Image (cartoon, rainbow, N blue to C red):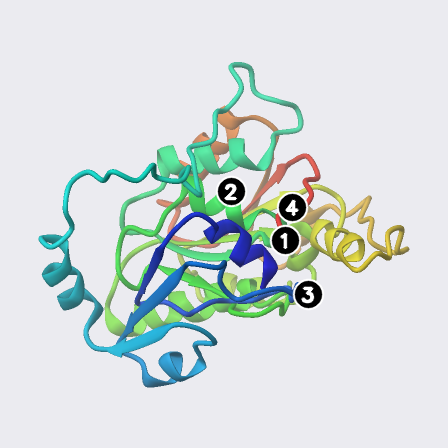
Amino acid sequence: MKTVSDRLAGHDLVVVIGAEVFRYYPYVPGDYLPEGTDLLQITGDPEVAAAARVGDSLLGDPRTAIELLVDMVGEGSTRTAPEPMARPRELPQEPNSPLTPPEVYGSLSRVRPPDAVIVNEPTSTMAQQFESLPTVRTGSFFATASGGIGWAVPAAVGGALGDRDRGVERPVVGLIGDGSFQYSVQAIWTAAQHDLPIVYVVMRNQEYSILKSFAELEDTPGVPGLDLPGIDIASVARGFGCRAVDVETTEDLEREFTAAVTAGTTTVIVVSTQPQKAML
């Protein structure tokens, strides 16, 4: 809770439209809202409203609410506005080697088809993913609401099968870390058997970064068994019947991703990345 409250400090009103209030995960003791901050939630889901731990909730259609509210927002203010909570990340002039997660997401943002679905589970770098790959269309972003690991590989299969059943043609992009990929790796066999148009981008930092970050959060650093050296993910993916490539640079990533979205089958792109502490 404290992390969310700290991010909202300095704002007198928080309006949450079409989303939960909030996903308090992981749990950090503290106030739900900073002093002097009010919150209004607008949602069409009574269960989401009932689960809100703070503020007032209004049941209604989020889109209609936005259309009615936008003309009521006045220009300017005598109060000094707080700094934006999210700012565009400046990428280096020369790419790193291995790449950083923001460099990977920046590359994908340049070549992602506008109708592509994102199934998201790069657990330790979700904040950076949101900055570079924002959701731009309804029904095109899927992520876990909790801390379960390994769901994205089969979830991408389910999403692609659902699209096929509805007669919808669009690529499904599964973003996942190398640790999470191991939990349900057998799902890529199903994807290959059905020739599903899925592109898995596996960020290989050779460790369970999210679990290392949790260990530090809980004051138990140095937990054994969280390093993952020596896993040839591309070979594993080929063994399950998928196209698979290893990439090291942004140019290779963009080229292989562009080829994968038109391949008509399942591709696993493994990109080497630097470990990064999760923003918990």
Q: Is residue 17 above or below residue 49?
A: above
Alpha-carbon distance for marks 3 and 1?
A: 22 Å
Q: Between disc 3 and disc 2, whose residue precedes?
A: 2
Residue under circle 2? 128
Alpha-carbon distance for marks 4 and 3?
A: 16 Å
Disc nearest the viewer among 3 and 1: 1
Q: Between disc 1 and disc 4, whose residue precedes?
A: 4
Image point (47%, 31%), residue name:
89
SS for callout 3: loop
Amino acid at dot 3: Tyr
Query: Where's residue 153, x and y in %?
Result: 55, 63
Alpha-carbon distance for marks 1 and 4?
A: 30 Å
Closer to the camera in the image, 48 or 95: 48
Q: Is residue 120 above or below residue 47?
A: above
The answer to whether residue 155 of the structure is visible from this angle is: yes
Residue under circle 3? 183
Disc nearest the viewer among 2 and 1: 1
Residue under circle 4? 234
Query: Where's residue 20, x and y in %?
Result: 41, 70
Image point (16%, 51%), residue name:
73
Query: Where's residue 26, x and y in %?
Result: 64, 64
The reply to whether the C-beta atoms of the residues labelled 3 and 2 are less than 8 Å apart is no
Q: Which mark is residue 8?
A: none
The reply to whether the C-beta atoms of the residues labelled 1 and 4 are less than 8 Å apart is no
Image point (55%, 15%), residue name:
94
Dot 4, how many residues are within 10 Å of its Cα: few (below 14), some (14-19), or many (20+)? many
Q: Between disc 4 and disc 3, whose residue precedes?
A: 3
Amino acid at dot 4: Ala
The reply to whether the C-beta atoms of the residues labelled 3 and 1 are less than 8 Å apart is no
Q: Which mark is residue 280?
A: 1
Amino acid at dot 2: Gln
